[in-house]
């Protein structure tokens, strides 16, 4: 079935460093891909999404491109801030029904 | 903005108790979901509902049941709570149209079973 695999954390970066969090997917067809973010003590928030191959989703300086050739949807940000410290989840729709399959999450800590 | 509200942020119950977790959304979404989140395991789907009175089992339904009597409300029930049900519970909702709609989450209920 449809699934995603994302890099394990934790990832620790200094402020203003470049961020990449890897996500690869296995899917039947071309379902939409999502990145969610979870700040400490909160639920998940949609960060960005891409609905078809070669789409680029972007929000708050984060970007991810839906790449069919490499079955990837890596999350990037050019210059991270302390406030970006959170857990990031890659997700896609399941083969049947309306639920999403999530990766296990990647914890990011940004230090001043 | 979509608002998904979970009735409690923190809850402490005892083993054997019947526990109710409530979730309400205000955007007329057809789909609603319950997940549990555990360290190292990510989010796992317990149950979901795509319409009033409709429900389907997710990946880990054992020990849980759900109720959807009104479109905006989706309840998760632990029939007889056990310590292995200590976890963070997340409710989500989404539109049904298009099948690629994002899910909107509540802030979660951290449940401890003693």
Image (cartoon, coloured by chain):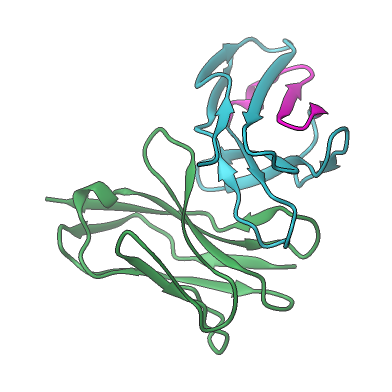
Q: State the hue of chain B.
A: cyan
Picture coordinates of residue B60, whole percent (x, y): 75, 41
The residue sitting at 24% across, 47% down in the picture is A83
Task: Check the image and report above or below for B41 versus B6.
Answer: below
Q: Is residue B65 magenta?
A: no
Q: How many marks?
A: 0
Q: Which residues are magenta?
A: B66-87
In which quarter of the view is residue B58 placed? Answer: top right
Query: Which residue is at a point 79% across and 37% down the rendered structure image?
Result: B61
Q: Nearer the viewer, residue B24 or A77?
A: B24
Q: Residue furthest left?
A: A112
Relative side of B43 to A17, left or right: right
Chain coloured green in this rendering: A
- Farthest-out residue, right: B53
Q: Is residue A73 above or below residue A94?
A: below
Q: Position of residue B44 (x, y in %)?
A: 65, 46
Residue B108, relative to residue A51: is it above or below?
A: above
Q: Nearer the viewer, residue B72 or A87?
A: B72
């Amino acid at each position: 079935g449809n699934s995603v695999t994302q890099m394990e954390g934790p990832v620790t970066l200094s402020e203003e460093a470049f961020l990449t969090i890897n996500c690869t997917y296995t899917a039947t067809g071309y379902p939409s891909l999502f990145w969610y973010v979870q700040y400490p003590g909160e639920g998940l928030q949609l960060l960005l999404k891409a609905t078809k191959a070669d789409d680029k989703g972007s929000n708050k300086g984060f970007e991810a491109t839906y790449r069919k050739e490499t079955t990837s949807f890596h999350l990037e940000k050019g210059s991270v801030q302390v406030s970006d410290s959170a857990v990031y989840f890659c997700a896609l729709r399941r083969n049947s029904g309306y639920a999403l399959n999530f990766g296990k999450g990647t914890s990011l800590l940004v230090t001043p | 903005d979509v608002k998904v509200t979970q009735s409690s942020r923190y809850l402490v119950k005892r083993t054997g108790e019947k526990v109710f977790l409530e979730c309400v959304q205000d955007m007329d979404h057809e789909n609603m979901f319950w997940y549990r989140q555990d360290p190292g395991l990510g989010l796992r789907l317990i149950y979901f509902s795509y319409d009033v009175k409709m429900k389907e089992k997710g990946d880990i339904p054992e020990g849980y049941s759900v109720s959807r009597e009104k479109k905006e409300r989706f309840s998760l029930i632990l029939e007889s709570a056990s310590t292995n049900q200590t976890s963070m519970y997340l409710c989500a909702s989404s539109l049904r149209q298009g099948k690629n709609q994002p899910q909107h989450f509540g802030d979660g209920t951290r449940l401890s079973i003693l």
